[in-house]
Amino acid sequence: MDADDTSRAERLGGGSLLVAWQLNDKNVLVVGGGEVASQRIESILTADSYITVIAPEAGLHPRTKRFIDLRADRISYHNRPFKGPQDLDGKDMVLTALDDNFLSRHIVEMSRERRIPVNAADIPDLCDFYFGAQIRDGPLQIMISTNGNGPRMASLIKTRLQKGLSGREGEAITKVGQLRSKLKERAPGVGGTLGRERMKWMSTLCNSWEMEDFTHLDDTLMDKLLDEGWNKDKRVPKPQELGLPIRFYYLSALFSATPMPIFPTILAFVAGALAATSFISYKR
Ligand SMILES: C[C@@]1(CC(=O)O)c2cc3[nH]c(cc4nc(cc5[nH]c(cc(n2)[C@H]1CCC(=O)O)[C@@](C)(CC(=O)O)[C@@H]5CCC(=O)O)C(CC(=O)O)=C4CCC(=O)O)c(CCC(=O)O)c3CC(=O)O
Ligand SMILES: NC(=O)C1=CN([C@@H]2O[C@H](COP(=O)(O)OP(=O)(O)OC[C@H]3O[C@@H](n4cnc5c(N)ncnc54)[C@H](O)[C@@H]3O)[C@@H](O)[C@H]2O)C=CC1
C-alpha cells in the first residue's frame, strides 16, 4: 500500500454497497399497489422473481393492474389489506409502498425479526437498501443512487448519462458475452495461467475495438475471430481483418490524434479553394 492507498483506506465510509442482486426465482412481497409499487413490480419482474402483491383493488395504479393482468405467470395478487406476519412466510425480500407510515414501520419490524431484507418507500432510515434511478439496455444496467439525499437529482443525472450513450452498448455487451462463452469452451478451466491469458485476451480485445464493432459479430465471425486471434498465438485481430466496415470514427480518431489546428486549417483551405474557383468562373 502506498501513501495514496493508505489515506483512501482511512477515508472509506459513508456510502452504501452497490451490487447487482441476483433475485431470479426468489419470492418478493410488495405491500401496496400505487404508482411506487408499480415501479417496484417492474424492477422485480426484470430480475425474474416471483411477486406477491397485497393491496386492495380500489388503490391499484393502472400500471400495477396491467402488470397483474399480464404477468400472472410471475405475480400472485391478493385483493385485500396486509394481514400480519403470516404474509411474510417464505419471502426472500419485502417492499412496502404504502400511504400508511405506521403500517410500513410495523412491516419493517416484522421483516427484521425474520431477517428478510426490506425496503419501505417512505422510511429511508429503516431501509436495508434503496432503489435508484435505472438505465437499462439488455445486459447493461446502470443505477444512479444519491444514497437517500436527492431522488429527483438521481433521475436528472440519469437523463444526462443517457445522452452520452449511443443506445448500442447493450447489443455490444450481449455479443461480448457470447464471445466470452465461446472462448471459455475453447479454453476451459478456472484460474491458472490459462485463465490469466483468457482475461488478458478479452481485455485487450475490448480495449482495442470500438464498442460498436462488437455489434457486427455473428456466430461465424466470432468463430473466425477466435480462429484468427486466440488460436494463433493469442493475438487480437483488427475489426477490418474480419471484414467489418471501416467506420467514420476511425477518421475522426485520426483527426483528434493530430494537432488541433490541422482540421480547421484543412476546412479553411477547402473553403478558400471553393471561393477562388467561384470568383474565377464569375470573372469569366
Ligand atoms: C430513499 C429512497 C428509498 C427507496 O425508495 O428505495 C427514496 C425515498 C423517497 N423518495 C421520495 C420522493 C421522490 N422520489 C422520487 C423518485 C425516485 N425515488 C427513487 C429512490 C428513492 N427514493 C430512494 C433513494 C434513492 C436516492 O437517493 O438516490 C428513485 C431514484 C428510484 C425508485 O423509486 O425506483 C426514483 C426516480 C427514478 C427515476 O426517475 O428513474 C421523486 C421524483 C419523481 O417522482 O420524479 C420524489 C419527489 C422529489 C424528491 O423528493 O426528490 C420520498 C418522499 C419525500 C417527501 O415526502 O418529501 C421518499 C421518502 C423520504 O425521503 O423520506
Ligand atoms: N421511493 C420513491 O420512489 C418514492 C416514495 N414515495 C413514498 O412511497 C409511498 C407510496 O407512494 P404511492 O405509490 O404514490 O402511494 P399511493 O397512495 O398511490 O399508494 C398506496 C397504496 O397502498 C395501498 N394500501 C393502503 N393501505 C394498505 C394496507 N393496509 N394493505 C395493503 N395495501 C394498502 C393502497 O391501496 C395503495 O395501493 C408513499 O409513502 C410515498 O411517500 C413517494 C414518491 C417516490
Image (cartoon, rainbow, N blue to C red):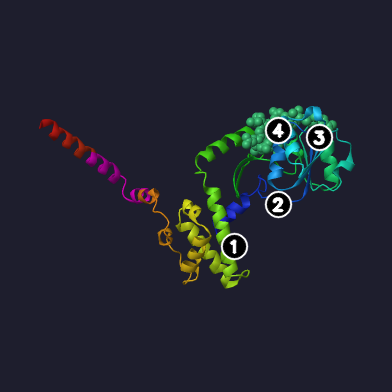
Q: Nearer the viewer, mark 2 or mark 3?
A: 2
Q: Is mark 3 within 8 Å of ligand 2?
A: yes
Q: Amino acid at mark 4?
A: Arg
Above/below status of 138 relative to 163: below
Q: Quadrant of the N terminus?
A: bottom right
**Label 4 crowd bin: few (<14), some (14–19), many (20+), radius 10 Å:** some
Q: Residue 59 appears in which quarter of the rendering?
A: top right
Above/below status of 135 relative to 56: below
The residue shown at (43%, 61%) is 242
Q: Residue 182 appears in which quarter of the rendering?
A: bottom right
Question: Mark 3 or mark 1, which has the lower sequence index?
Answer: 3
Residue stretch in magenta: 252-270
Q: Amino acid at mark 2?
A: Gln
Label of residue 254 in the image: none
Disc 1 element: helix
Label of residue 63 in the image: 4
